[in-house]
Image (spheres, coloured by chain):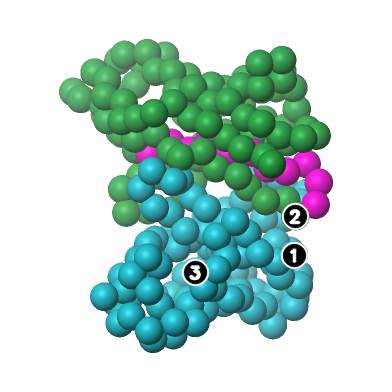
Chain colours: A cyan, B green
């Protein structure tokens, strides 16, 4: 299995609080991604990174920010959590020469 | 923009039945195509892939052929097992630029003994 660790695996938080999810990889892959998974929508891209300090928005980026200060870590922050951000969040990594992406185990976030 | 459309689920079959899950895509350039599988409570695992037209990806008895003329990548298996019950996602990876994966909405498959 690819070395990807997401933390925490489960979190319950209150509306309006900031939340940070962490993705850590040991594969030295260049690209890292954050997706959210919701019923009927498949996986939708939130943000991605193509190198240290190089990030860009995906299709559902509103209300989220990211940072990548080291190759191995990609942080997703919900600046002020809302109930619509209740979801399962997946981190993925890829290396262009390999083609496929590898996924973490997911973080289940509930905003109450 | 790029997009992937999968057949609506859920799909329920009996053990040893033939499986087809349809997937079509819209893309510029020459994307790579993938099928991922998600078992309950787990992340996504790569099932198979194809990187150019007419390539056939295969794994664990599953197959899919990259059909450029019909922009399709249908997943097939000749004889399904209960252990194949999962959610299946078709995806494409952009040929250039950000290498983003674009997913279909997923198809939940249940196999009954």
Q: Quadrant of residue B9?
A: top left
The rendered magenta stretch, by its main secondary structure, is classed as strand
In terms of depth relative to the viewer, which is nearer, A104 or B107?
B107
Q: Which residue is mark 3?
A: A5
Residue B20 screen position, x and y as percent: 43, 18
Asked if B16 appears above or below B87 in the picture, the reply is above
Q: Quadrant of residue A60?
A: bottom right
Dot 3, how many residues are within 10 Å of its Cα: few (below 14), some (14-19), or many (20+)? some
Residue at mark 3: chain = A
Contact flag, marks 2 and 1 (Cβ < 8 Å): yes
Dot 2, how many residues are within 10 Å of its Cα: few (below 14), some (14-19), or many (20+)? some
Q: Is residue B6 visible?
A: yes
Residue reaching furthest bottom? A17
In terms of depth relative to the viewer, which is nearer, B38 or B3?
B3
Q: Is residue B35 visible?
A: no
- Between label 3 and label 2, give the one nearer the viewer: 2
**Element on which disc 2 rests:** loop
| Mark-to-mark CA distance, 3 and 1 | 19 Å
| Mark-to-mark CA distance, 3 and 2 | 22 Å
3 or 1: tag closer to the N-terminus: 3
**Element on which disc 3 rests:** strand
Residue A5 screen position, x and y as percent: 49, 69
Q: Quadrant of residue B111?
A: top left
Q: Is residue A70 left or right of residue B109?
A: right
Residue B19 screen position, x and y as percent: 39, 18
Residue located 35% across and 48% down the image: A39
- Whether residue B34 is in magenta: the answer is no
Contact flag, marks 3 and 1 (Cβ < 8 Å): no
Q: Which residue is mark 2?
A: B98
- What are the residue bounds of the magenta stretch? B87-97
Residue located 52% across and 78% down the image: A77
């Amino acid at each position: 299995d690819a070395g990807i660790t997401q933390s925490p695996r489960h979190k319950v938080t209150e509306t309006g609080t900031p939340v940070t999810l962490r993705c850590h990889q040991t594969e030295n892959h260049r690209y890292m991604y954050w997706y959210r998974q919701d019923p009927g929508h498949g996986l939708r891209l939130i943000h991605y990174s193509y190198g240290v300090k190089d990030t860009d928005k995906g299709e559902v980026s509103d209300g989220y920010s990211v940072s990548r200060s080291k190759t191995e870590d990609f942080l997703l922050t919900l600046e002020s959590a809302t109930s619509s951000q209740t979801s399962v969040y997946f981190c993925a990594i890829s290396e262009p020469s390999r083609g496929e992406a590898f996924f973490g185990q997911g973080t289940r976030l509930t905003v109450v | 923009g790029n997009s992937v459309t999968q057949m609506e689920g859920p799909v329920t079959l009996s053990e040893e039945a033939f499986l087809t899950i349809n997937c079509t895509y819209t893309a510029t350039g020459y994307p790579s195509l993938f099928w991922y599988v998600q078992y309950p409570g787990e992340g996504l695992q790569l099932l198979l892939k194809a990187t150019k037209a007419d390539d056939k990806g295969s794994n664990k008895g599953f197959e899919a052929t990259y059909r450029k003329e019909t922009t399709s990548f249908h997943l097939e298996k000749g004889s399904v097992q209960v252990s194949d019950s999962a959610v299946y996602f078709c995806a494409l990876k952009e040929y250039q630029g950000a290498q983003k994966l674009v997913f279909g909405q997923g198809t939940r498959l249940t196999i009954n003994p």
